[in-house]
Amino acid sequence: MSVVSWAGGETAHREDEGTGFAAVVQVRTVGGSLTATDGGIEVTGADEAVLLVAVGTGYRGWQRRPDGPGTALAEARRQLDEAGGQGYDQLRDAHTADHGRLFGAAGLRLHDPASAAAAELPTNERLAAADKDHPDAGLAALLFAYGRYLLIASSRPGTQPANLQGIWNNDITPPWSSNWTSNINLQMNYWPAETTGLAECHEPLFDLVTDLAEAGRSTARAYYDAPGWCCHHNVDLWRATNPVLGDPVWAHWPMAGPWLAAHLWDHHLFHGDRAFLADRAYPVMREAARFLTHLLVEDADGTLLTCPSTSPEHHFRLADGTLTAVDAGSTMDHWLAAELLDNTVTAARELGVDHELAEELARVRARLRRPGLAADGRLLEWRDDLPEEDPGHRHLSHLYGLYPGSAVDPLGDDTLLDAARLALDRRLRHGGGGTGWSLAWVAALAARLGDGALAGSAVERLLATSIAPNLFDLHPPQLFQIDGNFGITAAIAESLLQSHNGILRLLPALPPSWPDGDVRGLRARGGLTVGLSWRQGLLTGAELHAARDTEVDLHLPEREGRPVVTDEQGNLVAAPGSARRLRLHLAAGGRHRLSYPQPDVGH
């Protein structure tokens, strides 16, 4: 074997400016010859060639000045040296095992004869061949698998979180600087992390939020003279939390903290890790809540609301036709404030800490002004029924309480359910869902509404209008934004399983175009792993595995017959009196199977 190494790297700045970066390439061949040229490496007559590539940067953390290209080159060489002693098969096997450990934890199959035939086509031809009257259900399953693949590849412990392009940016000056846009896009990247069995991939976001809580203390003091921490709509590698220059419609939005804190609380609901709650989640939540209480002001009727307030990234018109964005008490602010206060109080009481603060936050929560309704009954976006700049706007901020929040709950507090549906209908009637990520949000909202037809059509519309030939999500016509890939993966999972507010819903919004299928490895709050099977649109079986002792309030889809539940030994656990509701106790490590007895057809 002959081996030649070529090392190099160029920076776009001087040693004393910016962050150094470098790349190193090593080529191994069996037979033949290698020649290093100015343009790279020329391989001639080799039976086999293996390329190893390593990159390094001078980034040393958000609080340190970055190093130059010399350090970056040394880092890249070190990585290459570590891999250099391993053969191709060894490196590939290690990669496959590492990826498979996460990817194999969940899977979705949608049985469709048309999909089986189309599966042999290249993806671009398969997308072009999709028939709107007979959708290729297999493409939805492929999107689900692809989104999980992308999250596994772009967000692992010790890395930066997936940004607007994940790790696949190929531009020196990428769209929106490959930053984290924290008024929807960053959060959407992590919607499927817990529900599809990729909690490990959620960790880089937790690390980022911990840093933002530290960096955001100075922003809270400097801009609001407030305690706690805050963050606005745009975050970069250096943990910027301040409002950036530009239109207040996006620049002045200090509510990223509550939304990001919700991810830490949700992780706790899935896993019940008390140490994580005490050490990582609660400190972030508590300080975000302290800032929030400072931001709230008293309205004329004595209720509390945020002021100033915007609804990302949407203008309204004044009486003279002028576009503006700043109001008081937007509906999204209410959902975020109520959720953060509720969660922080619950966390403090669960941990047995900060008793006086918890009581204060509970009193503040009780005084929050509830969202208003328009004359037609729809949920308002702002405090009053203001003329929207764009009734079909891509942001669906005022529907946060339906998804990803859970305040509007079809099986719980459904008082605003019809109002939320009317608000979504209005957006869609006016052309809403004009980007891939917006369609993903539409699909998730439809799933929470129990509208499988709308959820399925949103998936199909995304495939038709907002997907590149390699399945990258698009901000049409051609800008790549990875959040749509992650958001649609989460929406597909939400159509099959929901676990909000203590209720486990099986097949809550099955699209009619997915009549037959199986899914395994979906995760539910309370430490449950769930597998489901359905045929002709009807649930035929379910398996539940508990990671810890838990009570399950099970809500089943409507169908004839009453299910039975058995344990691992086949012993009958429950034969419910109701065909739709069932309460189970699952011990840690226990597995229960739900099935429907075959009808007795006689002799």
Image (tube, rainbow, N blue to C red):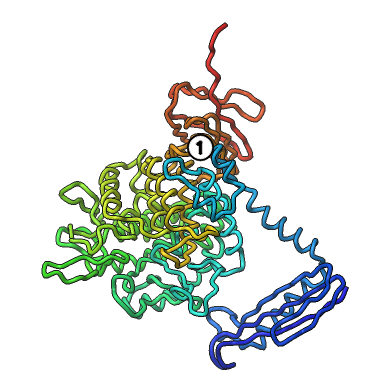
Amino acid on which disc 1 is placed: Glu
Q: Position of residue 88 (x, y in %)?
A: 79, 65
Total residue callouts: 1
Residue at the spot x=50%, y=31% of the render? 539
Q: Image height check: is 97 above or below 377?
A: below
67 vs 350, nearest the viewer: 67
Image-based side of 591 in relation to 341, left or right: right
| Res. 264 visible in picture | no
**341 vs 416: above or below:** below
Residue 378 visible? The answer is: yes
Q: Which x, y percent locates residue 439?
A: 40, 54
- Label 1: how many Cα within 10 Å (few below 14, some 14–19, many 20+): some
| Residue 215 rendering spot, x and y as whole percentages | 45, 76
Q: Name the image quarter holding residue 4.
A: bottom right
The residue tagged with tag 1: helix, strand or loop? strand
Quadrant where the N terminus sits is: bottom right
Residue extending farthest left: 320
Locate residue 204, reporting x and y percent. Answer: 55, 65
Q: The C terminus appears in which quarter of the rendering?
A: top right
| Occupied quadrant, residue 597 | top right
Q: Name the residue under label 1.
A: 551
* Front residue (pair 540, 38): 38
Q: In this view, does 109 lie above or below 208?
A: above
Q: In this view, does 283 lie to the left or right of 155?
A: left
Residue at the image point whose x is 51% and y is 60% from the top = 472
Above or below: residue 394 compared with residue 413: below
